[in-house]
Image (cartoon, grey):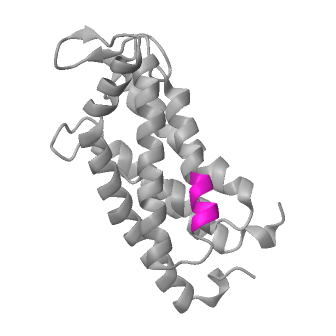
């Protein structure tokens, strides 16, 4: 990685990613109708679409996700950590997150509103499918309406997905809002600062 490749676009993109992680941590533990309203989905799309080197689009957003997860699990959610560094079924969430980066790379080849909105929808659905499957498969998977474990069959999985629908809605809304902020602000910065454009 040369010094030239780090200047200045890389640092600006990395700053966006770090801000996303900080925003996520500061919102942790706030149980409201907007629970799951987080910038991480937009962070994945933004990283996937904007880093010139594809591997950076995965490494830096995933590293930020990991560090924010560790901080939250050892502070805000320590009572639910069961002595683990990360939550049960974390790898399913990370697979979904990596898929969102891929969606950013494939769908947002050009920063157009239609491309970004489509990517936001696809990323929300993919995250919901992977994350809720991880919840269903998890050691501590409980149907919050009954207090009992999900049945280990298709009906149990569908019930888990059904209970995740409100979170899917919030994930989609947060993808749209934060993607609008990230992509819009970065596009404006590219116009004002030519050095940020991909060469």
Q: How many marks?
A: 0
Compared to residue 104, the image places residue 36 above or below, namely: above
Q: Nearer the viewer, residue 163 or 80?
A: 163
Q: Position of residue 157 (x, y in %)?
A: 38, 23
Q: What residue is shown at x 53% (from left), y 30% (from top)? A: 92
> For the C terminus, which image quadrant?
bottom right
Asked whether the viewer can see residue 191, the reply is yes
User: Which residue lies most toward the right here?
Assistant: 2
Asked whether the viewer can see residue 19, the reply is no
User: Which residue lies most toward the front here?
Assistant: 154
- Magenta segment includes 106: yes
Q: What residue is shown at x 37% (from left), y 47% (from top)? A: 24
Q: What residue is shown at x 45% (from left), y 43% (from top)? A: 127
Q: Position of residue 138 (x, y in %)?
A: 44, 16
Compared to residue 48, the image places residue 74 above or below, namely: above
Q: What residue is shown at x 84% (from left), y 65% (from top)? A: 2
Q: Nearer the viewer, residue 38 or 69?
A: 38
Magenta region, main secondary structure:
helix
**Is 50 left, or right, of 146 in this rendering?**
right
Q: Name the image quarter holding residue 179.
A: bottom left
Q: Name the image quarter holding residue 167.
A: top left
- Magenta segment includes 115: no
**Is 104 left, or right, of 172 in this rendering?**
right
**Is 125 left, or right, of 94 in this rendering?**
left
Where are the magenta residues, as a range? 101-107
Q: Position of residue 56 (x, y in %)?
A: 69, 55
> For the N terminus, which image quadrant?
bottom right
Compared to residue 187, the image places residue 75 above or below, namely: above
Q: Position of residue 80 (x, y in %)?
A: 33, 17
């Amino acid at each position: 990685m040369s010094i030239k490749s780090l200047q200045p676009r890389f640092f600006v993109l990395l700053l966006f990613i770090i801000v996303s992680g900080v925003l996520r941590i500061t919102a942790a533990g706030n149980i409201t109708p907007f629970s799951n309203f987080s910038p991480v989905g937009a962070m994945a799309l933004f990283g996937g679409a904007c880093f010139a080197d594809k591997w950076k689009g995965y490494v830096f957003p995933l590293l930020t996700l990991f560090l924010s997860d560790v901080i939250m699990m050892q502070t805000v959610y320590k009572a639910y950590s069961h002595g683990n560094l990360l939550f049960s079924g974390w790898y399913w969430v990370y697979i979904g997150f990596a898929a969102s980066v891929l969606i950013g790379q494939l769908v947002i080849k050009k920063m157009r509103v239609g491309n970004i909105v489509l990517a936001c929808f696809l990323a929300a659905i993919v995250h919901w499918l992977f994350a809720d499957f991880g919840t269903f498969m998890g050691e501590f998977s409980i149907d919050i309406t009954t207090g009992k474990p999900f049945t280990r069959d298709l009906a149990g999985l569908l019930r888990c997905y059904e209970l995740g629908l409100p979170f899917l809605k919030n994930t989609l809304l947060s993808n749209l809002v934060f993607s609008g902020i990230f992509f819009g602000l970065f596009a404006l910065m590219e116009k004002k600062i030519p050095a940020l454009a991909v060469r």
